[in-house]
Image (cartoon, rainbow, N blue to C red):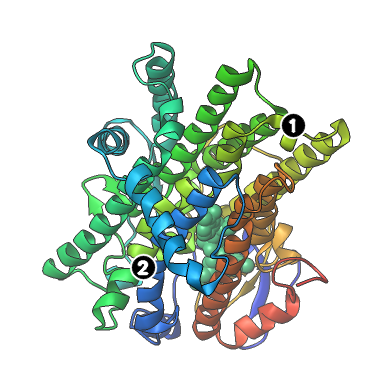
Amino acid sequence: MASSKKNDTKSYGAVADSKVVAPTEQGREVDKKLDQHLNYEFGGPWGVTAMMTGFPMLMYYLWICLQFYDGHIVYPSSLDDVKPFLLRMWGHVRDDATPTPYAFAIYSTFFFYQLLLAFIIPGYKQEGLPVPSLNYKTLIYNCNALGCFYTTIVTVAWLHFSDTFRLTEVIDHFGEIMSVAMIYGFAVSFGMYFITVLRGEQIRMSGNFAYDVFMGAALNPRIGSVDLKMWAEVRIPWVILWMISLAGASKQYDEYGYVTANMWFMVLATFLYLNACCKGEECIPQTWDMFHEKWGFMVIFWNFAGVPFTYCYSIIYMATHDPAKYEFSTLGYVALYATLLTAYYIFDTSMSQKSRFRMQMQGTYKFRWTFPQLPWGTISNPKYIQTAHGNRLLIDGWWKYARKPNYAADLVQSLSWAIVIWNASPIPYFYPVFFVTVLVHRCGRDFERCAIKYGKDWEEYCKVVPYRFIPYVY
Ligand code: NDP
């Protein structure tokens, strides 16, 4: 044992002395409680209704500012201008973002191709965490995102270079495709709600229709071997986002005969994120999105429409504006790339340290070689806190410095995606500003849940690891 300190409810230990963990009787009671609807989050029914109507409007507004007003934030100049302003906005949506059959064909072909690949490409089998609502049964996840990603690269390269479908079409028809993505987001959220309720598979329901559509009804929606929630989390948003960055690079090349270092930065940044999700897909079943969050509007809409069509603003700006507006000095580029690579390293290794620790605790960890495997991605003999619930909390590696080191690193990445065009437009700063709000809120929800789940052990953990994101800062 690396260090030990025992009393009635806790002990600190290392993996070498561990047996596979299982929830205690006390743990099972708490898990049962946490599988009930306890209290409203996100401002309750009114809050989620506002978000369901506000998200699409905000997405249209930001896109209009970016596309038609040179990336400036526009607003009515006086009270009298409010109506004409709203009419101008509506005019852009009507004329430039009508979901055309062509846009439906592009999004639907991509969507169903990804689904088809998920069914047919062989994958690495990973056992998920025990699911309390399934009497602690574990589900098997077919992790084939990497194979699907490589197949998609070959397919898209062929489509692009054979002029069958040039990637730049995605930027030329951005508004229309974004509208289709939103329609998919709404249709699948409502469809999933009704299907789940009709099948009697709903969990943690509040009884309020709007709230339950927003939070979702199903915890583990599946079609055969495909876990829809895990499939949708990676195969739609991050693949589209990377495709948009390639489209942006292609657009610059057509226009200027070269691709700027800023655009290459976005190609690299979105590739790293997507590749991390694919090459470490076996770690995803250990995340909160998989074991706790249901498949509702919040997750579905953001995966199908929000992530791909809002995190890309700097790419769209660069694809449609003169590089002189945002190019950096050599030193600026070195700082930008170095920041991204450092943040990525911490993001990748902190996520894998915790996920692999959880697999080790469950006895399901096997080394899976994918590219790249970074040093310190797995901690041997990590220190942890043994909880009365039965689970163990990692207090080693990046996790001895903060309770959410992965969030801090992810936030820096998101900020770099906006800084890439410096002050040429404020619109790309939407992503880091939105993301910090999401992560602080998500962190609060998670810690509240963990405080109920682990009680005094959580208090002890917070004493051992007092900072949330960054040591001595927050
Ligand atoms: P977390 O690391 O926050 O996982 C939270 C869960 O892990 C807790 O509920 C708890 O579960 C368990 N846990 C917490 N601390 C410990 C510990 N010290 N040791 C062992 N287990 C612990 O990951 P998330 O799932 O929230 O996020 C995954 C990633 O996804 C993050 O990096 C985030 O930034 C990213 N993300 C990105 C988004 C985007 O749009 N770009 C959106 C949302 C997330 P238990 O109760 O089982 O112990």
Residue identifier under label 1: 324
Residue 457 image point, x, y percent: 61, 83
Residue 406 image point, x, y percent: 64, 58
Residue 265 position by quadrant: top right
Q: Nearer the viewer, residue 58 or 298?
A: 58
Q: Is residue 137 above or below residue 237?
A: below
Residue farthest to the left, as pictured = 198
Q: Is residue 12 above or below residue 238?
A: below
Could you tell me which residue is drawn at 68 percent across and 39 percent down?
A: 374
* Amino acid found under the numbered disc labelled 2: Thr
The quarter in which the N terminus is drawn is bottom right
Front position among marks 1 and 2: 1
Residue identifier under label 2: 53
Could you tell me which residue is drawn at 36 percent across and 49 percent down?
A: 232
Secondary structure category for the residue under label 1: helix
Residue 77 image point, x, y percent: 58, 66
Distance from the alpha carbon under mark 1 to that under mark 2: 37 Å
Q: Nearer the viewer, residue 90 or 5?
A: 90
Residue 433 located left or right of residue 23: right
Residue 13 located left or right of residue 219: right
Residue 405 position by quadrant: bottom right
Image region (quadrant) for ligand 1: bottom right
Residue farthest to the front, as pictured = 80
Secondary structure category for the residue under label 2: helix
Residue 440 image point, x, y percent: 61, 71
